Image (cartoon, rainbow, N blue to C red):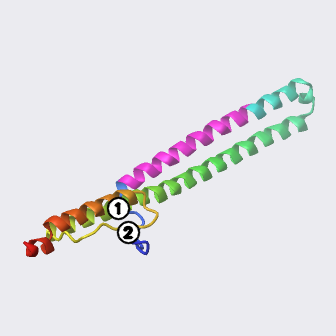
């Protein structure tokens, strides 16, 4: 299994990679929304408690609390967008490790099918998720090549 394989194209299977990247991004967005909602509710409850305790006598204090709530909402939204973007990128990276390996396996299978050459071996990058499967496929190809390959035909 070649560790020196460099893939020039990062997005190999757009549909697959986009699907899982968007799924992760939406998950990140939902988690951000829930955490933001809980945090905002907590801060809002404390602000209301301060107002009930008599802080509402001062217009400056009320305006300060309103500005702080708006600032908090902006910060929560910014964190949510950042997490969503980050999760989308993580989805692209990890889906590339799967889809790139599948692409490489398909290319090798097509080569075997087209040429009939049983000496073709499957290769993936060191960090690809399907490297164990590729190792098993290569063992199978070694057995098939030994049994049915060109070298075994000339021995008979």
* Gap between marks 1 and 2 measured at Cα: 7 Å
Q: Which residue is mark 2?
A: 1
Q: Residue 2: which quarter of the image?
A: bottom left
For disc 1, the neighbor class at 10 Å (few under 14, some 14 to 19, many from 20) is some
Give yes or no for residue 23 being in the magenta stretch: yes
The stretch of residues the image draws in magenta is: 16-41
Give the x, y percent position of residue 44. 77, 32
Q: Is residue 57 magenta?
A: no
Q: Which of 146 and 97 lies nearest the eye of the viewer?
A: 146
Tell me what residue is drawn at x 78 percent, y 34 percent: 43
State the residue position of label 1: 135
Q: Examine the image and state in which quarter residue 108 appears.
A: bottom left
Q: Please state if 102 lies on the left or on the right of 128 as rendered.
A: left
Placement of 93 over or under 64, stated as above or below: below
Q: Secondary structure at mark 1?
A: helix
Tell me residue 110's x, y (percent): 21, 65
Are there few (<14), some (14-19), or many (20+) residues within 10 Å of tag 2? some
């Amino acid at each position: 299994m070649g560790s020196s394989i460099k893939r020039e194209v990062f997005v190999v299977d757009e549909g697959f990679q986009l699907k899982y990247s968007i799924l992760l991004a939406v998950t990140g967005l939902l988690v951000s929304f829930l955490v933001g909602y809980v945090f905002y509710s907590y801060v809002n409850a404390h602000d209301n408690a301060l107002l009930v305790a008599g802080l509402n006598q001062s217009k400056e204090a009320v305006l300060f609390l309103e500005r702080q709530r708006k600032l908090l909402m902006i910060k929560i939204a910014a964190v949510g967008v950042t997490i969503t973007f980050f999760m989308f990128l993580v989805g692209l990276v990890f889906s590339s490790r799967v889809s790139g390996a599948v692409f490489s396996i398909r290319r090798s299978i097509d080569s075997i099918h087209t040429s009939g050459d049983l000496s073709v071996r499957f290769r993936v990058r060191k960090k690809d998720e399907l490297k164990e499967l590729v190792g098993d496929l290569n063992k199978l190809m070694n057995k098939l090549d030994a049994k049915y390959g060109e070298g075994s035909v000339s021995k008979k």
